[in-house]
C-alpha cells in the first residue's frame, strides 16, 4: 500500500500532514482516521492469503485508490508547505514560490509518467480477449458455460455482453449464484435455463442439482468450479479443448477419439507466450487454463500405459507454461 504512493507523493503527504496538523487539526485527524479505515484496516479485514494466492495482491491493489483519494488533499497541503518554506528562505513572493513548487511537481509527475508508462501500458495486451474468443470458439452452440473467478469470468462477460460474441452460449458465473438477484437475472435473460434454487450453496443447492435440471443440454466448465465437489460421484470431466464437459460416468469416450478431438480443438487456440504473461495477475490463471488440458490428457495417456503419448502431452503443457510444476514432475516420472 505504501509503495503505491511513491517517494515524491509520499514526501508531499508527510509535509501536508504536518501542515494540516498545524493549521487545521480537525482535518488532520479526519484524514488519519479515513486513511486507517480505507487502507490498513481494509487490508486486514480482507484476510487475503498472499502466499497461497499470489494474484490476491493484484485484486487488493484495485482498492488502494480509496487511500489515494483520502490523502490527495494532503498533497495540496504539502505543496503549500513547500511554497511557504521557499518564500521564507528566499526573496520570492508567496505567489512566485507557489508557481515554482507547482512547476517542480509537474516536472516530477512527467518524469514518473515517462519512467513507468512502458511498464504499465496495456494497450497491446490481448491475452484476456484472445482467451475469451478461444473459449467461445470452443463452446458448442446452445451450451451452458460455467465459469468461476474474476480472471476468467470478466473477459467472457465483456465479450458476450459488450461485443455480442458467444450469444448462443448461456454464460453462468458460479460465485454470483450466491446472490438471489443474479439467479433472477439469469431466469429473465435465459428463459430456457432451469435453475432449481433461488440461491446457490455447495452443500445442498449445488452444481450437481443444476446439471441434473439441465441434463438435456451440454454443460461445459472453463477452469475450475471451486470447492463444490457434488459432481464427483456421478459425473466425470471430459476434456474438450480449453473446456471441461460434464459427462455422466455411464457414458464412455474412447481414448483415440478424445485425443483426436483435443488435437483439433487445441490447435485452434492461441495461448499467450509465457514471457508476455504478468506474474501474480489474472493472466497467470488464463495461462493455466491453456496449459491444463494438455496436462489432463497426458495424465489420461499415462494411466492407459501410453508413455510416449503422455510424454508428448506433458511437454506441450510445459511449452505453454514452463512454471507448471506438476507437469514437470509428471514428465520426469514417465521418462524414468
Image (cartoon, rainbow, N blue to C red):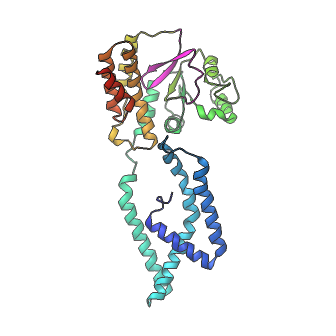
Q: Residue drawn at (67%, 35%), measured in percent from left and top?
A: 179
Residue 232 at x, y = what percent? 56, 19
Quadrant showing the C terminus: top left
Does 231 lie within the magenta span? yes
Q: Answer with the quarter of the image where residue 66 lies.
A: bottom right
Q: Residue drawn at (57%, 20%), measured in percent from left and top?
A: 231
Residue nearest the viewer, comparing 204 with 74: 204
Q: Residue drawn at (44%, 71%), measured in percent from left and top?
A: 105
Residue nearest the viewer, comparing 214 with 158: 214
Residue 256 at x, y = what percent? 37, 11
Q: Residue furthest bottom?
A: 91
Does 60 lie within the magenta span? no
Q: Residue drawn at (57%, 17%), measured in percent from left and top?
A: 217
Residue nearest the viewer, comparing 175 with 226: 226
Q: Which residues are magenta?
A: 225-250
Q: Answer with the quarter of the image where residue 72 lies.
A: bottom right
In this view, 272 is above or below 2: above
Amino acid at each position: 500500500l505504501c509503495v503505491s504512493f511513491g517517494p515524491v507523493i509520499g514526501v508531499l503527504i508527510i509535509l501536508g500532514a504536518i501542515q494540516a496538523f498545524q493549521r487545521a487539526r480537525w482535518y488532520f485527524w479526519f484524514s488519519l482516521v479515513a486513511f486507517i479505515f480505507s487502507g490498513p484496516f481494509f487490508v486486514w479485514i480482507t484476510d487475503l492469503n498472499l502466499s497461497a494466492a499470489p494474484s490476491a495482491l493484484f485484486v487488493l491493489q484495485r482498492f488502494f485508490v480509496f487511500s489515494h483519494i483520502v490523502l490527495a488533499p494532503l498533497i495540496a497541503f504539502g505543496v503549500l508547505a513547500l511554497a511557504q518554506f521557499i518564500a521564507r528562505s528566499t526573496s520570492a513572493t508567496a505567489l512566485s514560490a507557489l508557481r515554482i513548487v507547482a512547476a517542480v511537481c509537474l516536472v516530477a509527475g512527467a518524469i514518473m509518467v515517462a519512467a513507468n508508462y512502458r511498464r504499465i501500458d496495456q494497450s497491446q495486451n490481448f491475452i484476456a480477449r484472445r482467451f475469451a474468443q478461444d473459449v467461445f470458439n470452443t463452446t458448442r452452440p446452445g451450451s451452458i458455460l460455467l465459469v468461476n473467478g474474476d480472471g476468467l469470468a470478466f473477459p467472457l462477460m465483456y465479450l458476450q455482453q459488450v461485443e455480442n460474441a458467444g450469444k448462443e452460449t448461456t454464460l453462468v458465473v458460479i460465485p454470483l449464484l450466491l446472490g438471489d438477484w443474479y439467479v433472477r437475472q439469469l431466469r429473465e435473460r435465459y428463459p430456457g435455463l432451469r435453475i432449481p434454487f433461488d440461491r446457490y450453496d455447495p452443500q445442498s443447492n449445488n452444481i450437481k442439482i443444476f446439471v441434473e435440471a439441465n441434463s438435456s443440454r451440454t454443460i461445459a466448465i472453463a477452469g475450475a468450479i471451486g470447492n463444490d465437489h457434488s459432481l464427483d460421484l456421478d459425473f466425470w470431466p471430459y476434456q474438450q479443448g480449453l473446456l471441461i464437459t460434464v459427462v455422466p460416468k455411464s457414458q464412455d469416450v474412447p481414448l483415440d477419439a478424445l485425443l483426436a478431438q483435443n488435437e483439433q480443438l487445441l490447435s485452434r487456440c492461441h495461448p499467450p507466450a509465457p514471457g508476455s504473461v504478468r506474474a501474480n495477475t489474472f493472466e497467470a490463471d488464463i495461462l493455466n487454463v491453456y496449459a491444463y488440458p494438455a496436462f489432463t490428457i497426458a495424465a489420461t495417456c499415462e494411466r492407459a500405459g501410453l508413455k510416449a503419448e503422455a510424454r508428448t502431452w506433458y511437454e506441450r503443457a510445459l511449452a505453454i507454461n514452463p512454471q507448471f510444476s506438476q507437469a514437470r514432475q509428471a514428465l520426469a516420472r514417465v521418462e524414468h
